[in-house]
Image (cartoon, helix red, strand yellow):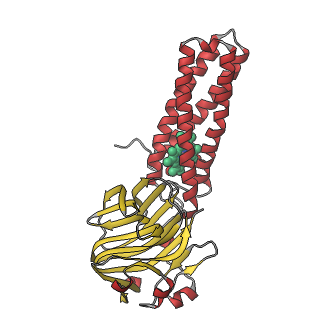
């Protein structure tokens, strides 16, 4: 049985009000205690509220981490969620640590001294700027971008295939001013001159294939030798959307991002019944998250690489979410290592910062 009302996306929006209300009240009561020194009630009440505030900020932080993995985001909201998440983490460390410090100062009787009490109040009041900024970013997620709001349709298909007619005619990626690009292959080989092959150019054959309701899509056929191709445009923080079918392919298919060369890149890999997210550093593979995943049939995928976070979705569902050092800028592309044919309908790359 779930205690969550069915309209609520997750627990986070129900909890956020507690740290905000408790910590603002704690600071007000603490300031009152500075003026009413002879009445210990105010100091005691403030300490109790800081402890409750620390506990509620911890619960809100945990619920926020869970919320971030349960919601599907419009492209423009990715960077904002990362900022909100980082601010939330600092807020948790700040008020969590402060609550412990305040309790120690109170229990040792030091808080009766004005020279100790006054700076403590200033520190708590300063932290409200951090709390306010965290809450303001969270509210923007909801009220500007509709994150977690059921009435807003964020369907993947609605952000799907590119429509630029010139690029469609040439079958090559269409590149925007900010270096975002989108690619809807329409011819078997014309697109190849627009791509940079990092590995296995001669090992790849390509043809247009009938994919029923989707119309004609690009078939990429390989036979054991790895192939890596990309649009040679360095980007830092990006969102990749694509529609792919791996039914006639055995091996590992990857969306690669922040590619500097054949040995240094980030990846989201699909194969062997799993989705894996990680990075290759000088040829050494580091896996940051792995989930069981069945790739049968057509799937729309989204891979968001934003600073220290990389989130990968199938449709609207988050599958992997790994954390690591922010990547250096690099290009976006596809790596195929296996045998058979990968079907690709479209690939769309958006710069998110
Ligand atoms: C600990 C301090 C935090 C505070 C005070 C806070 C505050 C807020 C606020 C005020 C909202 C708007 C809610 C509404 O208007 O109904 C919000 C939304 C949101 N926050 Fe946080 N937040 C915190 C931490 C986090 C963290 C660490 C994450 C994720 C990693 C996160 C993820 C989200 C998400 C995804 C939403 C959109 C609504 C939802 O699906 O829950 N928050 N937050």
Q: Give the image location of residue 276, x and y in percent.
A: 35, 61
Foreground pick, 175 / 225? 225
Vertical comparison of 86 with 321: above or below: above
- Which residue corresponds to the image point at 54% horizontal and 58% vertical from the top-left? 78
Q: Which residue extends farthest top?
A: 38
Q: Residue at x 56, y 38 (%)?
A: 91
Residue at x 51%, y 56% (from the top left corner):
326
Of 95 and 277, the residue lying toward us? 277
Residue 183 x %, y %: 50, 80
* Left or right: 145 as drawn, with respect to 310: right
Identify the image quadrant of the N terminus: top left
Question: Relative to 352, is 95 above or below?
Answer: above
Looking at the image, residue 341 sits to the left or right of residue 63; the answer is left
Quadrant position of residue 130: top right
Q: Where does the C terminus fall, quadrant-wise?
A: bottom right
**Residue 47 x, y percent position in the rendering:** 57, 21
User: In the shown orientation, is residue 337 left or right of residue 91?
Assistant: left
């Amino acid at each position: 049985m779930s205690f969550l009302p069915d309209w609520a996306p997750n627990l986070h929006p129900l909890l956020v009000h507690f740290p905000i209300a408790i910590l603002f009240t704690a600071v007000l009561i603490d300031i009152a205690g500075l003026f009413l020194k002879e009445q210990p009630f105010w100091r005691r009440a403030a300490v109790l509220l800081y402890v409750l505030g620390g506990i509620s900020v911890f619960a809100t932080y945990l619920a926020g981490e869970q919320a971030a993995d349960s919601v599907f985001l419009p492209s423009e909201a990715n960077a904002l969620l990362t900022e909100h998440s980082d601010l939330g983490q600092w807020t948790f460390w700040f008020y969590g640590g402060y609550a412990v410090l305040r309790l120690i100062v109170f229990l040792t009787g030091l808080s009766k001294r004005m020279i100790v009490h006054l700076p403590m109040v200033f520190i708590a009041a300063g932290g409200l700027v951090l709390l306010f900024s965290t809450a303001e970013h969270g509210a923007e997620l909801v009220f500007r971008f509709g994150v977690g709001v059921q009435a807003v349709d964020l369907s993947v298909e609605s952000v799907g295939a590119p429509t630029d007619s010139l690029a469609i005619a040439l079958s090559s990626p269409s590149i925007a001013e900010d270096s975002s690009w989108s690619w809807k292959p329409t011819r078997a080989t014309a697109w190849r001159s627009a791509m940079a092959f990092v590995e296995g150019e001669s090992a790849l054959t390509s043809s247009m294939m009938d994919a029923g309701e989707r119309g004609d899509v690009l078939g990429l056929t390989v036979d054991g030798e790895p192939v890596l191709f990309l649009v040679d445009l360095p980007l830092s923080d990006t969102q990749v959307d694509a529609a792919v079918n791996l039914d006639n392919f055995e091996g590992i298919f990857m969306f690669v991002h922040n590619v500097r060369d054949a040995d240094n890149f980030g990846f989201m890999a699909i194969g062997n019944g799993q989705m894996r997210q990680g990075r290759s550093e000088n040829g050494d593979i580091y896996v940051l998250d792995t989930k069981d995943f069945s790739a049968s049939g057509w799937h729309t995928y989204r891979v968001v690489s934003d600073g220290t976070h990389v989130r990968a979705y199938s449709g609207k569902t988050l599958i992997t979410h790994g954390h690591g050092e922010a990547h250096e800028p690099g290009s976006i592309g596809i790596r195929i290592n296996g045998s058979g044919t990968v079907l690709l309908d479209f690939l769309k790359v958006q710069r998110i910062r």
